[in-house]
Image (cartoon, rainbow, N blue to C red):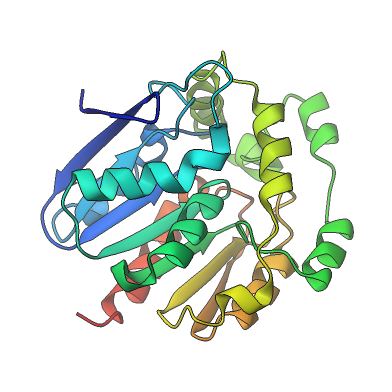
């Protein structure tokens, strides 16, 4: 089990495949296992790097550690540890904070960025309005035994997949995820002016039934990036990569094939 010791945390990571570096950053309900339907698809053409954020099993964080405030620094340390000079980043939900903040700090190393069902740390008055007018209630799904990040359709149409999602989420049983969520909300403070220098291609992708991050917010975020693109996957919720892997992988393939060498 490869472990990187950084800033009082043990960070688990895995490297599979060969080719340009493709790094996957999971969401609040996941860890490195979340990408089980992506790594086999991309590993013949890319060096696929998966990791568990600090505090998400099997990674650890120090007692009263920095949590999400250290996510981007952790990613930078991992990239340095692996000796990578340029990367392609795939960020799901919470991973958007990690990858957008890393890209802002090291734009010269990022060839392309995929923000899946996330706007990361980006904050504007219009995004705040779109979040306030969000499409659904997570509490209502929880009350029905449905994980909101999986969604009602996954639970109904693919119950085994919904069960697997909940099992992966449950691996980080000692983590205060409500506390992590609250910290992420506090860290959503990057203004639109800060991203105008990000000229690399950026794909903002959403599921049309996402009730966690409003699809309209992801679509609007795409218009703020100088080289932003937008894609919406029908009949999918917050975890397109998990629920509709064929469509997700195809969109990522198309995006990556258009990146400069």
Left or right of 255? Residue 39 is left
User: Front-most of 159 and 135?
Assistant: 135
The quarter of the picture where the C terminus appears is bottom left
Number of marks drawn:
0
Left or right of 25? Residue 97 is right
Q: Position of residue 157 (x, y in %)?
A: 60, 40
Does residue 90 sit above or below 141 in this rendering? Answer: below
Q: Residue at x 12, y 60 (%)?
A: 19
Does residue 22 sit above or below 75 in this rendering? Answer: below
Does residue 63 sit above or below 194 in this rendering? Answer: above
Q: Position of residue 88 (x, y in %)?
A: 32, 63
Q: Quadrant of residue 86?
A: bottom left
The quarter of the picture where the N terminus appears is top left
* Residue 195 appears anywhere in the view: yes
Q: Position of residue 49 (x, y in %)?
A: 26, 46
Left or right of 48? Residue 244 is right
């Amino acid at each position: 089990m490869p472990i990187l010791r950084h800033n009082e945390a043990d960070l688990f990571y895995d490297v599979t495949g060969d080719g340009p570096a493709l790094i996957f950053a999971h969401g609040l309900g996941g860890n490195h296992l979340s990408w089980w339907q992506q790594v086999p698809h991309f590993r013949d053409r890319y060096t696929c790097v998966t990791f568990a954020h600090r505090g998400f099993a099997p990674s650890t964080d120090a007692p009263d550690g920095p949590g999400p405030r250290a996510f981007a620094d952790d990613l930078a340390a991992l990239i340095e540890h692996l000796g990578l000079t340029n990367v392609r980043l795939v960020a799901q939900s919470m991973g958007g904070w990690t990858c957008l903040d890393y890209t802002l700090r090291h734009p010269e190393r990022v060839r392309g960025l995929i923000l899946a069902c996330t706007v990361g740390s980006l904050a504007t008055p219009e995004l705040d309005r779109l979040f306030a007018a969000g499409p659904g209630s997570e509490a209502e799904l929880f009350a029905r035994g449905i994980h909101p990040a999986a969604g009602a359709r996954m639970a109904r149409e693919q119950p085994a997949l919904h069960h697997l999602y909940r099992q992966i989420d449950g691996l980080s049983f000692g983590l205060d995820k409500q506390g992590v969520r609250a910290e992420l909300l506090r860290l959503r403070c990057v203004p639109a002016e800060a991203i105008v220098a990000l000229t690399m291609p950026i794909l903002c992708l959403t599921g049309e039934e996402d009730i966690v991050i409003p699809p309209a917010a992801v679509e609007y975020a795409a218009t703020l990036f100088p080289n932003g693109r937008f894609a919406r996957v029908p009949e999918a919720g917050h975890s397109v990569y998990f629920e509709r892997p064929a469509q997700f992988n195809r969109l990522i393939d198309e995006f990556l094939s258009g990146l400069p060498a």
